[in-house]
Amino acid sequence: MFRRLITAAAMLLVVAAAAPAAAQVGGSGTLKGRAYFDLMKGLSDANEDVLTFAFRRVYFTYDMKMSDTVSGRFRTDIVQATDGRSHVYVKNAYADWKATDRVGLRAGVMGTIVFGEVEEVWAYRAVAKMMEDEFKVRSSSDIGLMGRVRLNDRASVNVMMANGEGYDKPDDGANRKAYEVQGLFAPIPGLTVSGYVGLRGFDTDGDPATTGDQVDATTIDLAAGYAQGPFAVGGSVAMVNDWDGTAGQNAQGISGWGRYTLPNAPLTLLAKIDRFDSNTDVDADQTTYLVAGVDYAAGKGLSIIPNIQWYKVGAADPTTGFLLTFYWKW
């Protein structure tokens, strides 16, 4: 039923967008980029001999504006894998159609609708991802269709129908699609609140011709971020039924973070903690992830961020690392 409602909503938005739109020949665009580079030294018994350099991420983004109603984005994602090799993915390649002042349609490879707006308030993806992305509650980008409706100046709704596998995996035709709805609210200046419900299908044997083995994982996510002057705080809660396509296995996570810019100084203190349990029926298997650091704004477009990252799974010994993160954007 949920899947049918989302499909119907997406089709209605396509129809609503089918109003005549003025276009122009040519267009304009802006090229920009950002990169995350780390020097990491292990501080615990498990990784005390580790000293590594890594370009964790490099993004190149080209934003296009073809007319008052048509725009788009192309973004590459260059990832350094554990084997040291760099892999290039297309993270964004979408067209935006502004049908009316309140209704828009997006098609292609795009950011998903779980945590992106609140992550912008956190502002330190270069150091640590949002919990939902870190623990793969949902991929940060996927291929599909998204309808956007602005209800008023303080509320909007996004509806998405997507591949469900993420931007770095092909759509193999199996019925594993994602059907998602997000409500965004800004009740007061500086506060962003996101409520999300999603349904992802899993074909447990990988054969779309086999029937009766479909598992639908349902995700509910609530997130909020508040920024005012030099500080920002936020957090999120996620609950997933049939985690990763395993019937009866439920997962849940909670996250909190904050940052504060010191007055009259190029320094920002930041901290984040995630706690995620991939199987709520099993005791002592939760993962705790703690990050704390200082951002030194060395100059326009460049931050140098020394940070400590602490990672513990269940009763196992924790893993601790010191990272010197260079984050620059242009």
Image: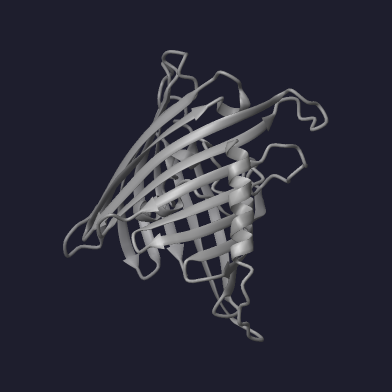
Q: Is residue 320 above or below residue 54?
A: above
Asked whether, in this view, residue 156 is left or right of residue 200, the answer is: left
Q: Is residue 292 above or below residue 213?
A: below
Residue under the image location 37 percent in, 60 percent down: 303
Quarter location, residue 178 = top right
Q: How many marks?
A: 0
Q: Nearer the viewer, residue 94 or 39?
A: 94
Asked whether, in this view, residue 314 is left or right of residue 19, the answer is: left
Quarter location, residue 152 = bottom left
Q: Position of residue 72 (x, y in %)?
A: 59, 69
Q: Nearer the viewer, residue 101 or 286?
A: 101
Residue under the image location 55 percent in, 26 percent down: 243
Residue 273 appears anywhere in the view: no
Q: Position of residue 210 (x, y in %)?
A: 81, 26
Q: Position of residue 325 (x, y in %)?
A: 41, 51
Residue under the image location 54 percent in, 79 percent down: 68
Q: Quadrant of the N terminus?
A: top right
Residue farthest toward the left in the current orientation of the protein: 263
Residue under the image location 56 percent in, 57 percent down: 147
